Amino acid sequence: MGPYRRPVWHCPTALETALETALESKGIDAHFERWLLPIIERAGDKAGRTLKYIHIDSWEGGRQNWSSDFPQEFLKRRGYAIEPWLPALAGRVVKSVDLTERFFRDMRLTVQEVMLNEYIDRLKERCAEYGIQFSCEPYGRVCVNALDYASRADLVIGEFWTGRKQRPPYVGRWEPLFDAEKFPPDRPQFAGYWYNSMKGLASIANTYGKSVVGAEAFTGCRGWGDHPYLLKSMGDEAFAEGINRYIYHLYAHQPYDDMQPGLTHRRWGQHINRHQTWWNMSGDYFDYVARCQFLLQQGRRVVDVACFYDESAPLSFNDIHFDPPAGYDYDLCTSEIIARMEVRDGKLVLPTGVSYRYLVVWPDRMSLPLARNIEKLRSAGATVYVQQEVVGTLGLEGFPSADAEVKKIAANWPRLPKGRLPEVFENDKLAPDFSGEGLNWMHRFVDGVDFYFVANPDDKEVERECRFRVTGKQAELWNPETGEITRLPGVQSQDGISSVKLRFGPTQSWFVVFRDKASGGQLAAKPFPTWKTQQELAATNWKLSFDPKRGSDQTLTLDKLRSWTEFDQPLVKYYSGTAVYRAQVEVAADIVSAGPLFLDLGEVSAIARVKVNGKDCGIAWKPPYRVDVSKALVAGANSLEIEVANTWRNRMIGDEHLPLDANWKSWEKLNAWPEWFKQGKPRPSGRLSFTTARHYTPDAALQPSGLLGPVRIISRK
């Protein structure tokens, strides 16, 4: 027989034998005893309280397929000996191509079972002895079904990235912020790099009754150029995918306050730490995130479709391609979840309370127990569809009788009309759970309350007709940016649908809440006010001062508001940090008495704090850059002070025009700490920023910075 090439499965080597720790419990036991246990013991009574989780990050150690007792494990689990089939691991066909393929499926399944039992379950068992839970990122170059792996976790964690593109001619160097033509440096980048893990792990959390779905959040190499407004829309998209706890990537330890922005993990990281230029103004952004996460951890997701994609191994989230039409949500489920389902009033119901209208079966092969469970649900009245004809079992277990039985059972299962879900929904007259052009959304239910998270990903104000598959309840609008709750007027209900026009500011999000009884303490303000300009502030008397610690002790008198990058002075053009705008403003008495007044800053890059007559009026961190100044403005003369912080990007670009004062192995690796640093001496180059990855080239695009205006006093009409 000729060679039968298998790219993954091959004979064990000495290296693989050395790496067999994932397939034998003695491996994780040794690791636990020598590495984890000393940490746990040092934690003392904080183990299980402060030290809550032992975490396995994304699997980057390569696949394994052998151990010293693998033949015994294979025989125990599959019911036949592996030895006659070993030539297949050397690329030979044994008996026939079909039977060899079946053997490989059995072997992959055995590797998965052994790894999950001997490594993951064993680690959980050891952690539980100390009251510590298990969390993981169940994806990467790992030889298991990612959904089955994820089901083991107490806390499942996905991942999403910010965008990036390579910038020639620097091989391996990245221009980490934007394609300037498509995404100007002062606008959000919406085309982030996302892992499919978010939806997969939101599914595991929903089906297994876990309230929290984490994400390694905003991973990337954008070089200290981001700020809260640029992050918000990407984070909102993750919320809409089912994520409800950010785990920011990353916080690098910063031991040196005189070396900023500081240390990094090579090129990688969003750099969420105190050395960010905007750190002291970030509280309102983090309050927004906290409100969203709290609400999105309540209850359960409302889902129409359960999809069983595959029970074989390995299965990566990136290999799953299930895409129902817009407006309908779904869960991916494991064979274990199928076994837990019951049928009530034609719906598939889980012990957690999650229910589904449909079960879609994707693979063309499955185990006999799974086929029997699916048939049991269908016979009890569940609506089941298959994506393709089921042709038999996966492996050699019970072959050929099991193969014939699976075919017989599945012969009665209907195919999706035209292979598509839209036809099913149309035939059943099932309206979308949500519709709103271009908006991201998530629907959850808790204690009789339906609530939708709805987010505008665009950097422009939009108004959309939104339709929700909920009726008979009072509608409210909850603003996660401010915590305000208002009654939502203008809701129309018909045929099980509530529709209303919603207005969104740039990248704004709302929670639309439907409850039987309205919240107490309703605010009088209209949810979508229109605005009237009471006074535009002239730009000719602004004084702009910079922080001498950041390189510029200049105070400028401005004839107009413009970006710092438009100035000729290098220390202003490339300035990174906080600068302060000051002005004296005369306000007429009739304006002060006109009702609640707001200061609208126009355009800001990147974030601002407003003080009027010495009173802190708050932070403006995203458009519209607007704060309430009603309690601070007085008739007559007013002192206005606006602090504006940009990002580190411009200073880092400016420093690339100056000589190097350290020995670099590459743009993201230092050979050694420079002598001036070790000796505590001034820098010889005149550079003002220092970080362990030089992200920018001298010709990189500068980021518009400062207060750009126009600045107005406005009121609600």
Image (cartoon, helix red, strand yellow):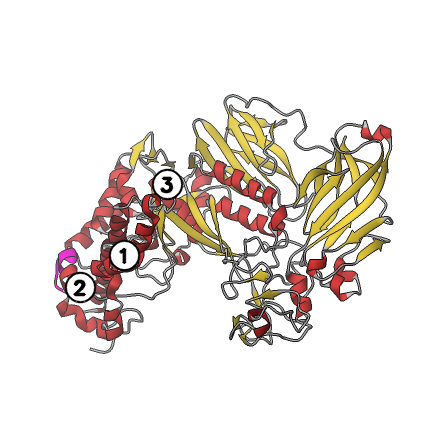
User: Residue 679, can we see it?
Assistant: yes
- What's the CA distance linking mark 1 and mark 3? 26 Å
264 shown above or below 273: below
Residue 61's x, y, as percent?
A: 34, 65
Instruction: Verify whether residue 78 appears in magenta.
Output: yes
Say left or right for 708 vs 416: right
The answer to which of marks 1 and 3 sits earlier in the sequence is: 1
488 shown above or below 238: above
Q: Name the residue under label 2.
A: 70
Residue 392's x, y, as percent?
A: 24, 55
Q: Classify 10 Å Cα crowding around label 3: few (below 14), some (14-19), many (20 and above).
A: many
Q: Which amino acid does label 2 sit on?
A: Phe
Q: Mark 3 points at which residue?
A: 210
* Residue in front for this viewpoint, 575 or 536: 575
The answer to which of marks 1 and 2 sits earlier in the sequence is: 1
Q: Is mark 2 on a helix, strand or loop?
A: helix
Q: Residue at x 17, y 71 (%)?
A: 86
500 shown above or below 259: above
What's the magenta region?
Answer: 75-81
Q: Which amino acid does label 1 sit on?
A: Phe
Q: Residue at x 52, y 72 (%)?
A: 669
Residue 354's x, y, as percent?
A: 37, 36
124 shown above or below 637: below
Instruction: Verify whether residue 144 appears in magenta.
Output: no
Residue 32's tag is 1
Q: Which residue is drawn at 58% across and 33% down?
A: 483
Is there CB contact under 8 Å for labels 1 and 3? Answer: no
- What's the CA distance linking mark 1 and mark 2? 22 Å
Say left or right for 306 vs 275: left
Q: Which one is closest to the eye, mark 1 or mark 2?
A: 1
